[in-house]
Amino acid sequence: MAIYHFSVKNISRSDGRSAVACSAYRSGEKLIDERQGKEQDYTKKTGVELKKIYAPENTNPELLDRNQLWNIVEKVENRKNSQLAREFEIAFPHELNQQQREQMLNELCQDIIKRHGVVVDAAIHAPHTANGSDERNYHAHIMFTTRSIDEHGNLGKKTREFNDNGKQEVEFWRESFADLANKHLARAGYLTEVDHRSYANQDNGLQATIHEGSKVTQLRRQGIDTEISLKNDAIKAQNSEKLVEIINGLEQEIIATEKTIAKLRTESPHSHEKTKYDVDVHN
């Protein structure tokens, strides 16, 4: 069953964060944070499957360089509480292979550019199975500027979509990402689909887990349980049981349907002729 995860985060100076440091970590590179006079070296980080910068066609070449891009952002966003970047964090359906993940990421990033006119810095991360991560957890961090590219190819005005209609904009992207994932799953030959709606809205009996955050995640990787991680483990176990019930129920429905079709065929006086079902399904 395909996994759906899509979240939107802000990278803000008021939270003590640096756009340069964030990009260095996600890309697994060594970048120089000119504002802090600090080297951000994450070259020892493993699992970076792909890193790529996407931008509008008229973007100045210096903004296509990861180190220059985020240092320019740090200079332009000069307030102590500046919002430096936004980030989409997505999980790929585990059914997709590396090439299919890259194709899906390319399409998503191009859609972001079309809608917001921004520069996008994206990286695909493979799961750290040695640290206890689920082997299906291929995901991407998609950082993008809060300013669109102007007619001169520079960072121009602040984008207003998330500020003016934040809830609607996030919902737009959650639904768009689900549609994109389902399109790529179908293209790869899978019938399974993801659903961007909450478990409550899907009315499927499943329960959402609690966001763990970086501290809880780090402790989990060290083998240390917390109240949140234990509760999430319990929720996941309950959901797994419920999913088994759902899948078994679907299988029983399929078996019952097949039996009904077979019975209708044997009872039909023209059972040797092709039925409408045969034509629709097998042609």
Image: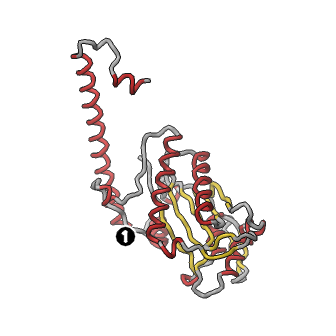
Which residue in the rendered view is the most extreme toward the left? 267
- In the displayed structure, 31 sits above or below 245; it is below
Q: Is residue 123 above or below residue 165?
A: above
Name the quadrant containing residue 202.
bottom left
Left or right of 209: which side holds 66?
right
Report the residue at 33% width, 58% height from top: 199
- Residue 230, image x and y in percent? 35, 66
Q: Position of residue 22 (x, y in %)?
A: 61, 71
The residue furthest right is 61
Identify residue type, mark 1.
Answer: Ile
Q: Residue at x 49, y 57 (%)?
A: 133
The answer to whether any part of residue 174 appears in the image is yes
Q: Nearer the viewer, residue 233 or 277?
A: 277
Residue at 27%, 31% (x, y): give it. 257
Q: How many marks?
A: 1
Question: Which residue is denoted by mark 1 in the rendering?
Answer: 228
Asked whether the viewer can see residue 238, the reply is no
- At label 1, counting other C-alpha atoms closer than 10 Å, the crowd grade (few under 14, some 14-19, many 20 or more) is some
Q: Is 45 or 7 nearer to us in this picture?
A: 7
Tell me the quarter of the image containing the C terminus. Answer: top left
Q: Is residue 93 left or right of residue 57?
A: left
Which of the 4 image quadrants contains residue 117? bottom right
- Residue 11 placement (x, y as % from top left): 56, 75
Q: Residue furthest front?
A: 151
